[in-house]
């Protein structure tokens, strides 16, 4: 028997990133890693930087870097309003490497003038991009 599907919509400020049927969605929230199937209890969640995996109806898995946003889960549809989301082929590795080095330098230098939380978040985003 085929797995039950749900409609998945991922929207970013500049485009409709993904629209299609899926059987499972995995991503990171501020509460930890989650995996969502059809008929999930309705809820909303806050996205944390991580790798999102979409399992499509045919079993194919697609991965993307999902950095921030909100998720609305309904039994038959999941909508992600993403501030930043990228397919692996869209990631500029040189830019991500430069961002990683800048964040590491800021964290190493320490001092009261840097925003540590912001530097740590920049480092996390760069590492996610470089993981592809």
Image (tube, rainbow, N blue to C red):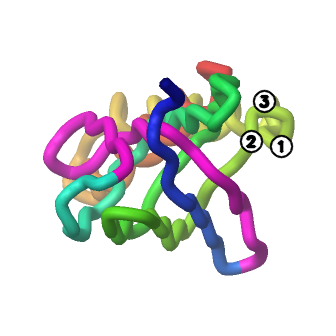
Place of residue 95 in the rendered image (x, y in percent of width and height, measured from the top left): 76, 39
Determine which residue is flagged by label 3: 93
Q: Distance between the residues labelled 3 and 1?
A: 9 Å
Q: Give the range drawn in magenta.
A: 14-38
Q: Position of residue 108 (x, y in %)?
A: 35, 29
Quarter of the figure with the C terminus: top right
Q: Mark 2 points at which residue?
A: 87
Whether residue 17 appears in magenta in the rendering, the answer is yes
Horizontally, residue 83 falls left or right of residue 75, namely right
Asked which quadrant contains residue 109, the reply is top left
Q: How crowded is mark 1: few (under 14 residues within 10 Å), some or many (20 or more)?
A: few
At horizontal 72% and vertical 62% (from top left) the residue drawn is 17
Front residue (pair 83, 36): 36
Question: Residue 75: x percent and y percent?
Answer: 32, 63
Give the number of the disc on residue 117. none
- As drawn, the label of residue 90 is 1
> Crowding near pointer 3: few (<14 within 10 Å), some, many (20+)?
some
Where on the picture, by quarter, is residue 36? top left
Distance between the Cα atoms at labels 2 and 3? 12 Å
The question of residue 121 being in magenta is answered with no
Q: Earlier in the sequence, mark 2 or mark 3?
A: 2
Name the side, left or right, on which 106 lies relative to 82: left
From this viewpoint, is residue 120 visible?
no
Pick whichever, 84 or 16, lies toward us.
16
For image coordinates 77% across by 74% down, the residue present is 15
| Observer able to see residue 41 | yes
Residues 109 and 121: in front is 121
């Amino acid at each position: 028997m085929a797995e039950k599907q749900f409609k998945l919509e991922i929207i970013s400020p500049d485009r409709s990133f993904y629209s299609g049927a899926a059987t499972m969605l995995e991503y990171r929230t501020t509460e930890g890693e989650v995996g969502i199937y059809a008929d999930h209890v309705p809820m909303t969640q806050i996205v944390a930087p991580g790798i999102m995996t979409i399992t499509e109806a045919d079993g194919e898995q697609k991965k993307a870097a999902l950095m921030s946003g909100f998720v609305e889960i309904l039994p038959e549809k999941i909508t992600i309003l993403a501030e930043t989301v990228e397919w692996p082929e869209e990631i500029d590795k040189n830019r991500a490497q430069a961002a990683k080095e800048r964040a590491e330098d800021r964290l190493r230098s320490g001092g009261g003038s840097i925003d540590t939380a912001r530097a740590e978040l920049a480092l996390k985003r760069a590492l996610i991009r470089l993981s592809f």
